[in-house]
Amino acid sequence: MTVKDVPIGSKEVIVAAGPCAIESEEQLMTAAKAVKEYGGKLLRGGAFKPRTSPYAFQGLGIEGLKLLKKAGEAFGLVTVTEVVDQHDLDAVAEHADILQIGARNMQNYPLLIAVGKSKKPVVLKRGSSATIDEWLLAAEYILAQGNNNVILCERGVHPLDRNHTRYTLDLSSVPVVKTLSHLPVIVDPSHACGNWRYVSAMSKAAVAAGADGLIMEIHPCPSEALCDGAQALNLDLYAKLMGELRAIAVAVGRSLA
Ligand code: PEP
Ligand code: MN
């Protein structure tokens, strides 16, 4: 599949990076500039955030979508953002290139049907308690609507031990899905680890395991992030990681911009 001029699921490994939540124009533009500069092809950023606490920052909503579109255009990046609720689908589809279905919504079948009907490319995250078969059947809900542009995203499953990682990154799902399905599969090491210290190692492992791409959280100043700062790479670490990933991609017969 090709989104704008970016091939996804080809020989080239693609990286999506950006903040968990869009917080301000300055934050997003600074992140987007780094994403582009070091070889990222996609800009991620949440405008509608599914938060565990209703009192936590919920995202900038439509204002965030506008900033995402602006940043994507300014730096020539394909944009990806989560659609949490069917009511926001038209607005999200209008402003972003790729829709994201979050782990919490993987089994929200009306939402899957709606994004299927939209015909926009969709990143479908694996639910944290979903089996691989349940995840692939969730993808079928989108495909069955005639939308073939589904990208699977492994983001970790319910952990045995939450003291050290937020979820457990099930990297075995990458080769399994490659065997069972023709769909591209990307890995989100940020939500899986929940801690920036482990993100680089698991990103490299994901590329070595055959992932078609990564989606990761980066922030110009992680300690000030309004959401998921603990798992965000700062821009220097992101730059360093991209260089390392390039070498791994080549070692497994792929490339990375
Ligand atoms: C996110 O990508 O910001 C997010 C909320 O991820 P997940 O749905 O995997 O928890
Ligand atoms: Mn997040």
Image (cartoon, rainbow, N blue to C red):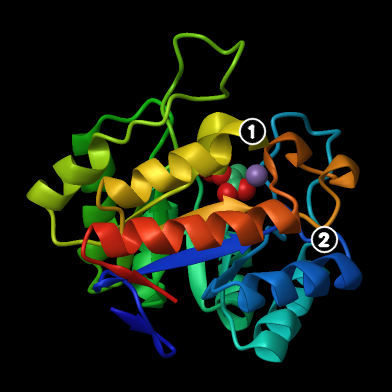
Nearer to me, 190 or 20: 190
Secondary structure under tag 1 reads: helix
Whole-percent x, y for residue 49 in the image = 69, 49
> Can you give x and y, in whole percent of width and height, for residue 178 in the image?
15, 51
Instruction: Please give the name of the residue rendered at 64% of the width and 70% of the height, measured from the top-left corner.
Output: 35
Is 188 rendered above or below residue 77?
above
Residue under pointer 1: 197
Q: Residue at image x 67%, y 89%?
A: 73
User: Relative to 241, is 9 on the left or the right?
Assistant: left
Residue at image position (86%, 51%) is 221
The quadrant in which the C terminus is found is bottom left
**Secondary structure under badge 2?**
loop
Q: Depth check: give the residue in front, 197 or 180.
A: 197
Crowd around label 1: few <14 · some 14–19 · many ≥20 (10 Å): some
Q: Name the residue under label 2.
A: 60
Q: Nearer the viewer, residue 208 or 128?
A: 208
- So how many labels did they put on this image? 2
Where is 216 relative to 94, above or below? above
Q: Which residue is drawn at 53% across and 61% down?
A: 242
Quarter, ligand 2: top right
Q: Can residue 107 be seen in this view?
A: no
Tell me, yes or no, if residue 31 can be seen here. yes
Percent coordinates x, y for residue 100 in the rendering: 50, 59
* Quadrant (top left, top right, bottom left, bottom right) of the N terminus: bottom left
Where does the image place residue 139, in percent across and percent down from the top left? 27, 53
